[in-house]
Amino acid sequence: MEILMDPLEVMENSIKAYKLTTKYHGNFVDLKRALFLGWYCNLKDPCKFCYMSTQKNKIKDPKSARRRLEGILAEAILMKRIGWKLEFISGGYGYTPKELNRILELVAYLQKSKQYLNVGIIDFEKLNLDLVEGIVGAVETVNEDLHRYLCPQKPLDKTKDMLLKAKEYGLKTGITIILGLGEKEKDIDKLLDLIEELDLDRITFYSLNPQKNTIFENRSSITTLEYMNWISTVRLNFPKIEIITGTWVDKLSNIGPLIMSGSNTITKFPLFSIYGKKEGITVEKEIRSTGRLLLGTFSDIEVLKGNKKLENTPYVDEEIVISEENMKLLESLRDAINKKIEEYISKILKRIRS
């Protein structure tokens, strides 16, 4: 990305953005995590930056790359326990509406919370929309040339049509954007136009995490100031939008500046490998260093075990009604889910001790 921005202007805009965020969203920051269903993408030509594109030719049976249902549901339970909202339910394309409905209903029931979906182009007529809070479109980049090259099977027009249709159904909408793919600073204006056109409720930014065996393997990601520039510009133009920002374990020092630039939420962590360790504690310190209160925890072991109730949680319990068939399925999986929860907790405790 060519650097044309004025760094002093970025800092000044960030101060304004921080104050605007306080005005419209309060003094809280929370943690979110995408709930992935599997690691296979059925697009013939997957996005060129994606980890799944490196696995596609290695997977002979796509269904073997799907996560077991008890693992998905155990993670959903733990997420609520430690106060992390699900950013969205996601995974490689290829799930039937019946399969998606089953997972959606079970996750929503266990979390007592409606869910966001990021699963490609939605067939609205076949989904239980009563349990959907919002739909997310994987835009990735608003630079048209880059998009056609990097995401050849995710046409922007189809994604836009889906998000506009979601609004007709009374659903919230959001998009994902990855920074560091080669976009230019002038593309910020295209993003602002898109947010306005689609009347978006939220936007998730990720900074590129270069994946091995992709064309970005040896590429560096964007700088902190560039990231701040995108966040603060969106916040100044759209004070009420929810901004979610992703970072990675090698960029934890980004967290404070991103919050100061207008971010509401931090995401994109390998949760179970750093919970309760110095990295998880660093995330909490970065958030609190900005003067914000943290909803959820990245370190409390007693909360993780279920021995103590979390005080600061972003969850507000909703009445969730699911089919009798899925209720029976859930009951049949109870033992397997509980066993998986214990496995997750045991792995975390072992890593903390090591």
Image (spheres, rainbow, N blue to C red):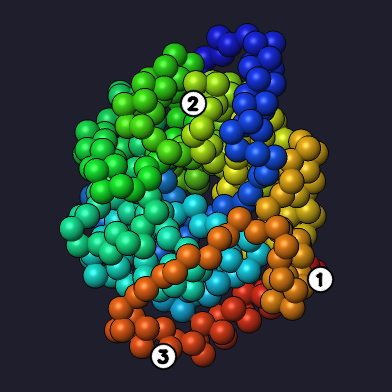
For badge 3, the amino acid type reads: Ser
For badge 1, the amino acid type reads: Arg
Image position of 256 (left or right of 157): right
Measured in 3D between alpha carbons, the distance from the residue under mark 1 to the one under mark 3, in whole angstroms, is 34 Å
Above or below, comparing residue 274 to residue 327 in the picture: above
Please provide percent x and percent y for residue 232.
58, 24
For badge 2, the amino acid type reads: Phe
Number of numbered discs visible in the structure rendering? 3
For mark 1, does the 10 Å Cα neighbourhood hold few (<14), some (14 to 19), or many (20 or more) residues?
few
Please provide percent x and percent y for residue 62.
30, 66
Please provide percent x and percent y for residue 320.
41, 70
Task: Give residue 221's mark.
Answer: none
Which quarter of the rendered picture does the C terminus lie within?
bottom right
Q: Residue furthest left?
A: 125
* Residue shown at 71% from the left, 71% from the top: 309
Image position of 58 (left or right of 209): left
* Residue shown at 75% from the left, 74% from the top: 308
For label 3, the residue is 332
* Residue shown at 60% from the left, 38% from the top: 25
For label 2, the residue is 238
Q: Which numbered disc, 2 or 3, marks the residue that appears first in the sequence?
A: 2
* Quadrant of the rendered image containing residue 14: top right
Query: Which residue is nearer to you in this view: 122 or 46?
Result: 122
Q: Secondary structure at mark 1?
A: helix
Query: Which residue is nearer to you in this view: 335 or 3?
Result: 335
Measured in 3D between alpha carbons, the distance from the residue under mark 2 to the one under mark 3, in whole angstroms, is 46 Å
Task: Give residue 353's mark.
Answer: 1
* Residue shown at 34% from the left, 75% from the top: 322
Task: Please tell me whether mark 2 or mark 3 is closer to you in this view.
Answer: 2
Q: Which numbered disc, 1 or 2, marks the residue that appears first in the sequence?
A: 2
